[in-house]
Image (cartoon, coloured by chain):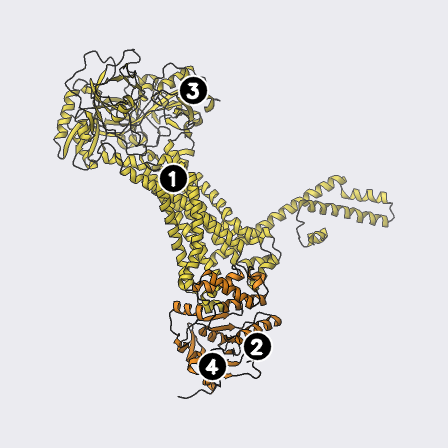
Chain colours: A yellow, B orange
Amino acid sequence: MTRNIRPGVRRLFRLSPRTDVQAVADADGELDAFLEERIEYLVGRGMTPGAARAEALARIGAPLHEARTSLRHSASRREARRRVGTMVDELRDDVRFAWRQCMKAPAFTALAVLTLALGIGANTAIFSVVHRLVLAPLPYPEGDRIVMPVQVAAGERDVPLNASAGTGLAAAWLARGHTVAEVAGASQSMFAIRADGTVDTIPSAAVTANFLRLLGVRPILGRGFAQGDELPDGAASVAMISHSLWQQRYGGRSDVLGKTVSVDGIPRTIVGVAPAGLSIPLWRSTPPDIWVPAPLADAASGSSGTMEPGPTVFAWLRPGATPEAASSELQAIASSAPERPGVLPTAENQAPQRFRVMRARDFLGQRERRALQVLFSAVGALLLIACANVANLLLARAWARQHEFAIRGALGASRARIARQVLTESMMLALAGGLLGVGVAWLSLRLIIALRPPALASLADVRLQPVVLLWTLGVAVATGILFGCVPALLSSAQAPGDALRRETRGGSSGTASRRVRSALIVFEIAASLVLLSGAGLLVRSFAALQAMRLGFEPRGLVYANVLLGMGPFRDQKPQLRAAIIDRLRELPGVTGVAFGVMPGKAFGGPGLETENDPASGQRRLPSVGTVFISPDYFRVARIALLKGRLPDTSIARAPGATPRGFAFSPEVLVNQEVAHRLWRDGRALGARVRQSDFGRSTGAPAPWSTVVGVVDDTRMPDVHGDRAELQVYSLVPKVLGDVPIVVRTNLPGDEAAPIIKRAIASVHPAIFVRPPLSGDTYLRNGLAPTRFAMALITAFAILALVLAAVGLYGVVAYGVTQRTREIGVRVALGAEPKAVIGLVVGVGLRLAVVGVVLGLAIAMATSRVLRSMLYAITPADPVTLGVTALLVVAVAVLASYVPARRALRIDPAEALRAD
Amino acid sequence: MMTDPMTQVSRTTSAAASADQTLIRLAGLAKVFYTDEVETHALRDIDFELRSGEYVAITGPSGCGKTTLLSILGLLDTPTSGEYTLAGEPVADLPSAERARIRNRQIGFIFQAFNLIGDLTVYENVELPLTYRGLSAPERKRRVTESLDRVGIGHRMRHYPAQLSGGQQQRVAVARAVAGEPLLLLADEPTGNLDSASGEAVMELLRELHLAGSTICMVTHDPRYEQHAERSVHLFDGRLLRDERPVGALT
């Protein structure tokens, strides 16, 4: 009807012409009316029609088409302004009304906001972690050029086996490739330093001289490293200290330059101070306090048999080179090289090795990446559950407000207008939930930081950054739309007449609304079951890890690494070792001391080959860990000797038999896994073995050693502990620089560790000891990643279950309210209390069963994502899934029982009278 | 004891009832509703007897206590004081589960608003009280079919209530009430939501049931339908004012 209103009347009453086309038509009409009236007037005054038209056109003051265009633009702009003004007015009205609605039902509002805050807060917290570890760009100029050559698992495209493809390959790539500009290496460690009279062990890094330059980092004081600084032995006498060490130890004084600091016994001159917070890219532990230069091979050698993590090789792509092109080039070079020094083979049969170049920012440990994926999925599911819950609440309220919407519709509100009103309320709830969610996220982050595993030590400084808050805002808005659209659609879909009739005559309780609400609850139950089953799997995996057979006894065992390699001890090592052993044996509570490392840890050592046997030929293992020990080692570590005997310490290696490096002792032991791989017939004892790539550069083979015993496999207490490592146990060489020592004590390991460190240091004031590692800490660290994932997923799963239970309770309770009369009728007809309870609980139970079946299907389909996080349990473990399903059903029954009890209190006479 | 003039009720029927024929006996029954500030005496000192096979109409103006009395008779509500004996057994203070059992086995309800359950078919609605009684499926089927045929709605047993007219819905309600073969049929304004033709049809149905031996207690405020009962009890302000056989009552 309003379409036919004359333009003048429209303008008079400020009625909107609705569309641009209409506005343009109005403008045209106005102009034409003016011309028509003017011509008519002039003709009336005696002018001819032609002259009158010319005169009228002249009055316009511009050519007709220009005047028309100008008028059209003016009309369009006016209408656009009016539309915006109207929209703002309506939005203000909607917001005001929504606010009143929220305040009218404070319990509803509080429940909705709290539910959303939990979902959004958990999401924000995990996003902060993901942002910190994965998404945040590397804080270096041209950080996108920084790549890492990695070896990937055969058959799997993106699963790195190792952070470094090897320095040999990296050097070959740099020499022959066209995509790479420079290569640098970095290795983080714990160095013992002596400075200004105090000895301490601090996080440190050995880096190639070009490392800081390539990062684009300049020291804030002094200079960085030059190529000549990384020369080995003696010449390498410079170091750079961190900003924090400079502040703490040297009071931020500029005269620190030129001072000498003893690093692992080597005196070094401080030449520079690094900028605050400088760390090795992607290294997630504490930033180094001291930086020393080292050649690429040393920085990446990592074969000292100590406990430090492996090295990392970085490369800088040439401008314009892509990681894909670089990957192809690297693979081609690796495949064509006759020998690939430093490359870690993938299997004993020397299967083709695959390499890939990954942007450094894309690189994250597979397990951590998977854990973050799982956690992110978990909080995503939690947020969806929260949305479903609030959508359910809004649906219930929207249904109760049908009469209001009907009246609005009857008064002329369009469907879109009603839907927008409902959406405005949703958005207000979502934004309030987002605001409170920031607080929840802050608390969650504190929890995450407290539980973080050692590998994620850098999470200690994770904060709610602006980009994260922007994410929260986005999530809140998306959430508001998500949970608000269904109630909005259902609210606006009701014909006003139907709703008003229903209001006066009574009628159905909203089948569509009920179905949607039921579907939402089914989804909530299914999602919480998926989360709970994941948590259950991790809990069982954690229990299995704790009960894992390690092959040694970590409790009461302490490992200490004593540095005798450099400095004044070059000729006194055997005597100092003996003195250390004697001093440790004198300590109270100590029951055994031996040379050797903490068992279970794998070291990528050289290959191992057997003597050529006419029956089985020569067999090889590409990489075997070597543990240098004293014969007492197995007793102290409590590793079982399965066959044979301990090596004879009196048999000496013939002079000249070790051309380079540390060869095996004449008699060695192998673990069961090596024995199984090399001698399937079990004839390991008496066989002869040697290092296969020993003395590669000189061409001299390693001397043969005789296997005199087979010991039990040892395992790390982590999820990969089911794979036994390949290990050879050789007597410790007299000249070994690092002296690994294990001590068995009656004291708790954590208490004994500092005592042992002091005792070793007391043997000689110049001895450096790295922080001893107790078996208890070793166990804790091994379990930490699983505990971290387990704790968070379990927390999210419990939260999800509580939300689902609250949602189910809401639906069932609302159903009881809607069915009050029906229940009254049933009671009047003789339904006993158990029948009423059965009726109400049955509703919840049916939804729960459907949700559980759906959840089990989803859990089975998605369980493989958890596979790499589990130990000794399959992702589709029927016991876990069964128990989880029962738990969910039990909670659903409980959530339904509460409204069922309320249904029992329905007075049938009252209920029937209410009609 | 002083007798309130308002309680000078005619007890022509109940006084003559012999003890073994008495189905319901109320003595000094009262019902008080309490709110925070107000005490409402819905029923006061009601003495009333109903013999088996009787058809009694409870009448009176709105708010006089008719429905409250019917609720107490149907064990949907409990009296504040007084005695209520049903088939010789005191039932005033029974626990709710026992009252439910008696309702299910001995009492049939017909409501003004039909009170059929919308999500159940006609068949299922009639079957519902038999299900609570624990009867076997074949027995339930027999009784449901018989009841629906008896009220002339057997051909609609697969329909839902919303697909029926008001008169048909009330017939279903009657079928549900009689399917359990109760001792007593309680009807609360059974024609209140019906047009006159449908109302007459339902009343005719009740008459037929009465003639077949059913004991019926019906609340109505419509004088036309009061005539269908053989006895009329008139309430006013919660007191039993008259208990008489209306002139022209159907017997």
**Is label 4 on the same chain as label 1?**
no
> Where does label 2 land, which residue?
B225
Residue at the bottom extreme of this rendering = B2
Residue situated in front as seen by the camera: B15 or A391: B15
> Where does label 3 land, which residue?
A331
x and y percent of residue A496 in the render? 60, 58
Q: Amino acid at mark 2?
A: Tyr
Q: Quadrant of residue A491?
A: bottom right
Q: Secondary structure at mark 1?
A: loop
Disc number placed over residue B239 in the picture, else none: 4
Residue situated in front as seen by the camera: A559 or A802: A802
**Is label 2 on the same chain as label 4?**
yes
Badge 1 crowding class, 10 Å Cα cut-off, few under 14, some 14 to 19, many 20 or more, is many
x and y percent of residue A259 in the render? 26, 24
> Where does label 1 land, which residue?
A876
Cα separation, mark 2 vs mark 4, equals 21 Å
Quarter containing the N terminus of chain A: bottom right
Cα separation, mark 3 vs mark 1, equals 37 Å
Q: Is residue A368 above or below residue A238?
A: below
Cα separation, mark 3 vs mark 4, equals 103 Å
x and y percent of residue A218 in the render? 37, 25
Q: In the visual, does A202 lie left or right of A812? A: left
Q: Quadrant of residue A627?
A: top left
Q: Amino acid at mark 4?
A: Arg
Q: Amino acid at mark 1?
A: Ala
